[in-house]
């Protein structure tokens, strides 16, 4: 008899992602460099048994005195001159202790050994609630019991920039990035579900930030595709059911039910109201909208990258007449990229800023310079658009 359908679903989702990771990052040779730069095996070619502190039985040669311990035997680990064994990639799971991430951790612990992948876990202690350190220690214990190694807790200090939710997210991802670098992890798995995706799309719609905001969370994101989200096509109840049938303890973060947080209000008030008004299937439709929007946004981004060299002059300045001839969606992407390259922080650059720059091209009436975040200034000079700091 096979596993429960919920367990089978989460394992299949993780297995697919792990296969992708292996395809993109095949096992590397387990070597290190000598001071002169020559490769050498990390482990010696001869293994001594028994190692101190291990429990391993040793055979005693016939006729040997039984009152003396046998000498450690020497056996070749691999033939002399053979290539070192490949080093399996390490995949970490970001685990808060909630149902989504605990289901993800259990699936990773089950699937990774079958594919020869090393698996570990990280939990981030935001320090925003009493006893958060103890709860983080409990999560580390659960990850260890699942067989994940390394398993660690990282305490962070949450700032105030962008509001509490954004600040906590920034601190969390900074800690996860540092953990990946420290352990040499190839990827970090995140437990965002289809429900989280639907909420993200609605939040983007409320901000009026354009098609990229409507595309929600990507299945693969971060530097070199570090972050993977296997559960974007699974609902939250599937993850919770998988934890229940496997008797995995889960922790329900009270912040997820606190109406002080926008996402919490959307989860407990906004989405239920939409389903009541529009019928079931709203979550699935929003998640589908995210994927369609992402496809469109990716295509427009590619178009903008290809078109940008053609709208710059020999000195690298943007030519307003050539920009004017482009479709607005492509032109505004070029303007946003130019502002970021000049030093404007991407997270502080909003649609209204890009619209103001765009008017220097489409509605030019001699207006003055546009002040952007990061002390960046955009102005029109002699038919050229100049964007630079100061």
Image (cartoon, helix red, strand yellow):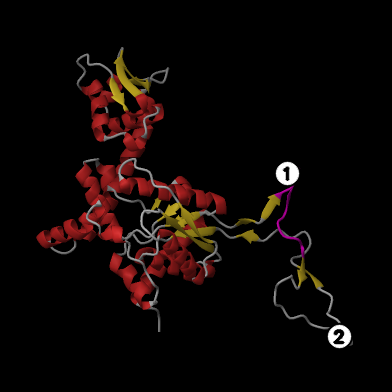
| Residue occupying the point 36% across, 30% down | 344
Percent from the top left, x then y, of residue 326? 27, 28
The reply, left or right, for residue 103 in relation to residue 279 is right
Mark 2–mark 1 Cα distance, whole angstroms, equals: 48 Å
Q: Secondary structure at mark 2?
A: loop
Percent from the top left, x then y, of residue 209? 24, 40
Percent from the top left, x then y, of residue 146? 49, 71
Q: Quadrant of the rendered structure where residue 277 is? A: bottom left
Percent from the top left, x then y, of residue 26? 56, 56
| Residue occupying the point 37% across, 60% down | 191
Is 40 magenta? The answer is yes
Is 343 or 264 nearer to us in this picture?
Answer: 264
Q: 370 above or below 243?
A: above
| Residue occupying the point 32% across, 35% down | 348
Is 39 magenta? The answer is yes
Q: Which mark is residue 37?
A: 1
Is 108 or 270 nearer to us in this picture?
Answer: 270
User: Does residue 327 appear in this view?
Assistant: no
The reply, left or right, for residue 197 in relation to residue 97 is left
Mark 1 surroundings: few (<14), some (14-19) or many (≥20) residues within 10 A: few
Q: Which mark is residue 67?
A: 2
Which stretch is magenta?
33-46
User: Does residue 347 appear in this view?
Assistant: yes
* For the residues bearing labels 2 and 1, Cβ distance under 8 angstroms: no
| Residue occupying the point 39% across, 26% down | 342
């Amino acid at each position: 008899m096979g596993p429960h359908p919920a367990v089978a679903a989460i394992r299949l989702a993780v297995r697919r992602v792990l296969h992708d990771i292996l395809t993109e990052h095949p096992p590397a040779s387990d070597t290190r460099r000598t001071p002169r730069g020559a490769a050498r095996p990390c482990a010696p070619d001869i293994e001594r048994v028994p190692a101190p502190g291990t429990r391993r039985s040793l055979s005693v040669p016939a006729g040997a005195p039984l009152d003396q311990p046998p000498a450690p035997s020497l056996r070749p680990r691999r033939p002399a001159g053979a290539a070192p064994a490949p080093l399996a990639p390490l995949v970490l799971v970001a685990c808060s202790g909630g149902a989504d991430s605990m289901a993800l951790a259990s699936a990773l612990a089950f699937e990774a050994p079958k594919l020869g992948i090393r698996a570990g876990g990280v939990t981030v202690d935001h320090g925003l609630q009493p006893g958060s350190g103890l709860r983080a220690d409990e999560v580390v214990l659960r990850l260890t019991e699942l067989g994940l190694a390394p398993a660690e807790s990282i305490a962070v200090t949450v700032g105030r920039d962008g509001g509490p939710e954004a600040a906590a997210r920034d601190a969390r991802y900074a800690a996860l990035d540092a953990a990946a670098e420290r352990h040499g992890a190839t990827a970090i798995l995140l437990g965002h579900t289809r429900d989280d995706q639907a909420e993200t799309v609605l939040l983007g719609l409320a901000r009026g930030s354009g098609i990229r905001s409507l595309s929600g969370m990507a299945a693969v994101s971060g530097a070199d595709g570090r972050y993977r989200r296997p559960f974007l096509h699974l609902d939250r109840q599937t993850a919770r059911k998988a934890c229940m049938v496997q008797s995995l303890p889960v922790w329900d973060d009270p912040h997820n039910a606190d109406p002080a947080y926008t996402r919490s209000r959307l989860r407990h008030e906004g989405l239920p109201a939409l389903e009541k008004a529009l019928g079931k299937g709203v979550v699935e439709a929003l998640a589908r909208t995210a994927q369609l929007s992402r496809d469109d946004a990716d295509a427009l981004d590619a178009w903008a990258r290809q078109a940008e060299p053609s709208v710059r002059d020999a000195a690298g300045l943007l030519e307003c007449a050539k920009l004017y001839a482009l479709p607005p969606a492509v032109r505004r992407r070029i303007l946003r990229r130019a502002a970021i390259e000049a030093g404007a922080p991407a997270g502080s650059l909003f649609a209204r800023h890009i619209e103001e720059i765009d008017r220097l091209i489409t509605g030019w009436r001699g207006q003055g310079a546009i002040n952007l975040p990061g002390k960046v200034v955009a102005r029109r000079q002699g038919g050229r658009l100049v964007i630079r700091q100061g």
